[in-house]
Amino acid sequence: MQENRIRIDSLEKYGVIPREELISLLSSYDDEDRAYAAQKARAISLRHFGNKVYFRGLIEISNYCKNDCYYCGIRKSNKNACRYRLTPEEILTCCRYGYEAGFRTFVLQGGEDLWWTDERVAALVSQIKENYPDCAVTLSLGEKDTESYRRLFAAGADRYLLRHETADQTHYGKLHPPELSLKNRKRCLEDLIEIGYQTGCGCMVGSPYQTCANLADDLLYMKKLHPQMIGIGPFIPHKDTPFRDFPAGKLEDTLFLLSLIRIMHPHVLLPATTALGTIQPDGREQGILAGANVVMPNISPEEARKRYLLYDRKVDAGADALKNQMLLQERIEAIGYEVVVSRGDYKEETEQ
Ligand code: 5AD
C-alpha cells in the first residue's frame, strides 16, 4: 500500500512519525509492506553490525516469583508450577560451560524471588566478574528499588533487561494485578538508565486486549526512553494462567514490529526471542531477516529449562543445551549470518 510505504520511509528518515500515522500503519499493513520494512531493517542492521548475530548465554536462575502477572506461567498463583532455584555454585558451573562454549555475555534471568536478596545477587555478580573479567553480566530479575539497582551495578552488573510490557496504563491494568503499576515499571527503567546500565525494555506482541494504538504507544515510549536493547516476542498462552484461552500473538505482527523497531533504532541490540522460535520453527531466523541481531541460547541446566515455563511448548525446553546452540548456530549461518560471541556492547557509532 502506497501510504504505508510513505510512512515507513518517513520512519526511516525522521526516526518517528505521529501517533495517528503509526496506528494507521499498524492497522493496515499487508505482506508487501512487511517485506518493504524488513528489507529496510535488514539493510540498517547490515550497515551497523555487518552480518553478525550476537549470542548471549541465558541462565534461568529461579522460577519462584512473588508477582501474579496474568500472562505468566511462573506467576505465584500457579500451583502447578514446579518451583526450583539454582544455587550460586550451579550458576557458576553454567558460566564455566558457557564460557567454554564461547559465550562472553551471561544473562541471569529469574522471577522476583525473595531468596535472591541484593546481597546474594551482588556476591554472585562479583564472583562471575572475577572469574570472567572479559564477560558482560546482564540481569533480568524484575523490579527493584533504586538503591538495589545501584548496588548490583556497583557489584559489576553491566546490563539490565526489564520489559515495560505495555506503555498504556489501562492495558497495563488488564495484564497485571493491582499491586503492580506502570508508573513503578517506568521508574525502574529510568533508574537503570540513569545508573548507567545498558538497559532493555520491551513488550509482548498480541497480548490479551492489546490494540494497534497500544503498540503505537509502545513504539513511542521506546523511542522516548532510547534504550540500548529492546526485547519483543509474541504472547503465548500458558495453560495454568487466566489467559489460557487467548490466542497467541502472530508471527507476522512480531516480525513487522521488529522491523519497525530496527528502523527507529538503528543501533539497538534487538533479540530474536525464544517465544518467536516457539510459535514458528524458523521464527528466530525470520526475526534476524526482519532486523534482529541478537539471540539468547538457553544454557541453564536441563532440569531448570524444563521448569522455567513462562508459556506452553517453549522451544529448547528439553534436550541438550550445547546441541540446541549448535543447531541454532547452523541455522543462522544457513541464512548467511555469522555468529559472534564477543561481549557485543551497545555502540552508537559502530565502525563496521
Ligand atoms: N508469552 C510470551 N511472553 C511472556 N512473558 C511472560 N509470560 C509470557 C507469555 N505467556 C515475557 C514477559 C516477560 C519476559 C521475561 O517474558 O514479557 O517480561
Image: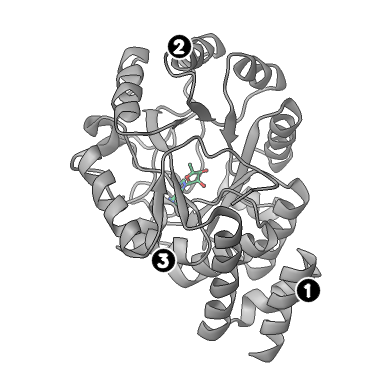
Looking at numbered disc 1 in the image, what kind of residue is underneath it? Glu
Q: Is residue 46 left or right of residue 105?
A: right
Q: Is residue 261 left or right of residue 324?
A: right
What's the amino acid at mark 2? Answer: Gln
Query: Could you say where residue 25 lies in the image, as x and y percent from the top left?
Result: 67, 77
Above/below status of 347 relative to 40: above
Between disc 3 and disc 1, the foreground one is 3
Q: Which residue corresponds to mark 3?
A: 286
Q: Amino acid at mark 3?
A: Gln
Q: Where, quadrant-wise, is the N terminus in this rendering? A: bottom right
**Relative to the observer, which residue lies in front, 186 or 6?**
6
Callout 3 environment at 10 Å: few (<14), some (14 to 19), or many (20+)? Answer: many
Q: Who comes first in sequence, dot 3 or dot 1? A: 1
**Is disc 2's CB within 8 Å of ligand 1?**
no
How many neighbours does mark 2 have within 10 angstroms: few (below 14), some (14-19), or many (20 or more)? some
Q: Are marks 3 and 2 in contact (CB under 8 Å)?
A: no
| Residues at discs 3 and 1 in contact (Cβ within 8 Å) | no
Total number of numbered discs in the rendering: 3
Q: Which mark is residue 127?
A: 2
- Quick one: label 3 or label 2, which is nearer the N terminus? 2
